[in-house]
Image (tube, coloured by chain):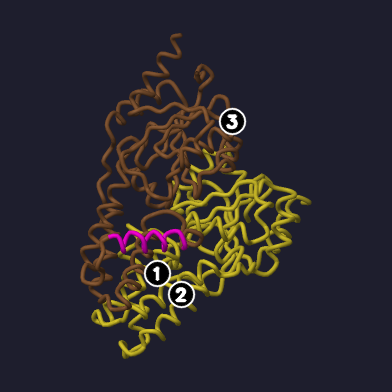
Chain colours: A brown, B yellow
Amino acid sequence: MVDFSTIRYVALDADDTLWMNEPIFVKTQDACRDIIDDFITDPKELDEKLYEYEKKNLRLFGYGVKGFVLSMIETVIELSNGKASGSQIQQIIDLGKEMLDHPVHLLETVENSVKVLAEHYTLLCITKGDLFDQENKLARSGIADHFDIVEVVSEKNEQTYTDLLKRHNIPADQFLMAGNSLKSDVLPVLQAGGKAIHIPYHTTWEMEKVSEHQAAGYNYLELGRLSELVDLLRTESQS
Amino acid sequence: MVDFSTIRYVALDADDTLWMNEPIFVKTQDACRDIIDDFITDPKELDEKLYEYEKKNLRLFGYGVKGFVLSMIETVIELSNGKASGSQIQQIIDLGKEMLDHPVHLLETVENSVKVLAEHYTLLCITKGDLFDQENKLARSGIADHFDIVEVVSEKNEQTYTDLLKRHNIPADQFLMAGNSLKSDVLPVLQAGGKAIHIPYHTTWEMEKVSEHQAAGYNYLELGRLSELVDLLRTESQS
């Protein structure tokens, strides 16, 4: 059993925890595949080459849509042997712009859960990625005002959480993080001494996946949706 | 006269205040012009069209190298009527990667000034742009440890500074900001009730320029280099 009675700070991840995100990347990747259909024989070619570029470029580009678009362009140039046309490259950039302008679709139970959590806890949003894009999405989400602290970070590892807790004078045993990524939202929080809840989303980006082996031995709960966290904390406070 | 005796917090901009930045953009733009030389008749064509794209894309891309590279690609596609080759587009992406990997060149007097300022004040670095890139540059600068607070923000306006001061419990009259941009580092700080020092850099990006008219009536000092700020504050504390 995990004891939640000490929790005073609840932190939520954003992409695929508060709102839909990964499906937009998948949809864009499909559209990119259509654009360069003539240059590939196997649909998987794009996925594999793109993932290769994303991994290679991560050190310089970090996470986010703009780096994804640049990696897509490099992939298309390579797969087409440099034959992709200017208009095809422009279509890919336009796909990226659509992603950045995409309406923010809150996930099931998020709107009310965030409201209730904000009434009882200091509520944080801790999200990884492009500062400008993440701030834009939060601003358009309609739920920004419920968060006491918003942190956009470039990476989510144990050090990130340790530094963040220190910066805000948050004792680790009062801190709970919930998110869809075991790798970013759960394991490093537990390593930093906090508590964590996994709320899986049906689609997970390859780079966020962890093996069962990596997650073994860690003590965390898995819930189906954010409202279950509200219920859980309510039960805890009454027990 | 501006009274600096109340100052307890000194904040510094990063790009073109701590280290060279704008010349890297200018150099890249020159290299891009060479790449598409065959498609343009007047060298100015690239600058004008690129600036047009940068302004138009700012709402979606924000500031930073990755957005700059995407705008360059769009510019080149348009100026070449879609005839730019895959290899030319790849060269432009490679220019962007060189920018992101560029060594950090500290400006004159910065290294020692930052050290001295950190001994006497709570030292902040407040920089606009891409979170990942700015954190990378600071980490590689060799002076990161002198800063008590680092804030990467997506825009620098009055609201940004007001929020930031509130978040860190900094009274506006104890806050001094120094930077190379009147538009981002000086005027909005004065509007937020702080004090500001302008340390101009020889090259200013078009979008950061303000007219004399816009700066008129504001009370700020202009200095030639960061060490002059150290001297000024030292004189103040002795008077």
Q: Is residue B239 above or below residue B203?
A: above
Residue A193, which numbered label?
Answer: 3
Which circle's residue, 2 or 1, is located before the other in the chain? 1
Counting from the top left corner in percent of width and height, residue A100 is at: 31, 54
Residue bearing the label numbered 2: B95
Q: Residue furthest right?
A: B238
Crowding at mark 1 (Cα within 10 Å: few <14, some 14-19, many 20+): many
Amino acid found under the numbered disc labelled 2: Leu
Residue under circle 1? B69
State whether residue A133 is above or below residue A159. below
Residue at x 61% of width, y 63% of height? B18
Q: Which residues are magenta?
A: A44-56
Label 3 marks a residue whose chain is: A
Judged left or right of residue B71, residue A189 is right
Q: Nearer the viewer, residue B191 or A37?
A: A37
Give the secondary structure at mark 2.
helix
Residue B28 position in % (x across, y down): 46, 77
Q: Are marks 2 and 1 in contact (CB under 8 Å)?
A: yes
Question: Are the residues at dot 3 and dot 2 in contact (C-beta closer than 8 Å)?
Answer: no
The CA distance from mark 3 to mark 2 is 42 Å
Q: Are marks 1 and 3 on the same chain?
A: no
**Residue at 54% across / 38% down in the picture?**
A188
